[in-house]
Image: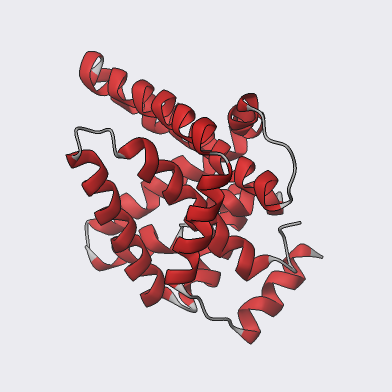
Amino acid sequence: MKKEKIDELIARGYDIDIEKAFRNGWDMFKAQPFYSMLYGVFGLSVQIFFTVYLPDYAFIFSVFLAGPLYAGFFLVANKISRNVEVTYPDFFNGFQYYIPVMLVCTIGQVIAGFGLLLVLPGIYLMVGYLFSVLMTLFGGFDFWTSLEYSRKVIHIRWWKFFLLVLCLIILNIIGALLLLVGLIVTLPLTFYVIYCLFEEITQETLVE
């Protein structure tokens, strides 16, 4: 049933408003600023630990931890959107979906990485897979279905999503330049903006 609804969404198309997505994402951040920043600090601390102290094992973070760790922001965003009370442990619920999220993240990175050898295909897929984790969390799809539906949905407005990704990259670069302190705000905001777009596009399809 969910697949048919997504197919219908792809067939009829949609449009996105990047400015609105940022406003909605910011409102979502303001709903839980302390917990969002606290979890952002935790995630960044784990990532920095591997990068600085275990550089030879940095792949462990990117392959086995990053996906489930940051998926927590999406799950909390869904609770905020539904006006459900959020507690700090809710941010760790991405690990309840550990295997499917890890698979979709890792395989998506590998495919996009091979695409980068030809430059343009890799850029296309990196943007196209933006919703893949969300498809896994809220669609319950296997990794390949999640990757493909993410790509097909985003393909409809790919250039706008490319602009969105550029804006998010610039935002996080600015956050990093502020002695990394800004990242504890820009990192959660990034995931909330992506979630808000996903929810708006799929609100009658996947997200409840």
Compare residues 140 and 164 and report the one nearer the observer: 164
Counting from the top left corner in percent of width and height, residue 115 is at 30, 58
Compare residues 36 and 135 and report the one nearer the observer: 36
The N terminus sits in image quarter? bottom right
The part of the image, by quadrant, that contains residue 19 is: bottom left
Point 62% across, 67% down: residue: 200
Q: Is residue 131 visible?
A: no
Counting from the top left corner in percent of width and height, residue 138 is at 69, 51
The part of the image, by quadrant, that contains residue 202 is: bottom right
Residue reaching furthest to the bottom: 12
Up-down relation of residue 44 to residue 146 (above or below)? above
Q: Is residue 170 left or right of residue 187?
A: left
Up-down relation of residue 122 to residue 99 (above or below)? below
Residue reaching furthest to the right: 1
Scheme by which the image is coloured: secondary structure
Q: How many numbered dots are placed on residues in this image?
A: 0
Residue reaching furthest to the top: 53
Up-down relation of residue 60 to residue 122 (above or below)? above
Q: Is residue 136 left or right of residue 114?
A: right
Q: In this view, does 158 lie to the left or right of 183?
A: right
Compare residues 123 and 114 and report the one nearer the observer: 123
Point 59% across, 31% down: residue: 91
Q: Can residue 138 be seen in this view?
A: yes
Compare residues 146 and 80 and report the one nearer the observer: 80
Counting from the top left corner in percent of width and height, residue 60 is at 38, 24
Counting from the top left corner in percent of width and height, residue 49 is at 30, 18
The C terminus sits in image quarter? bottom right
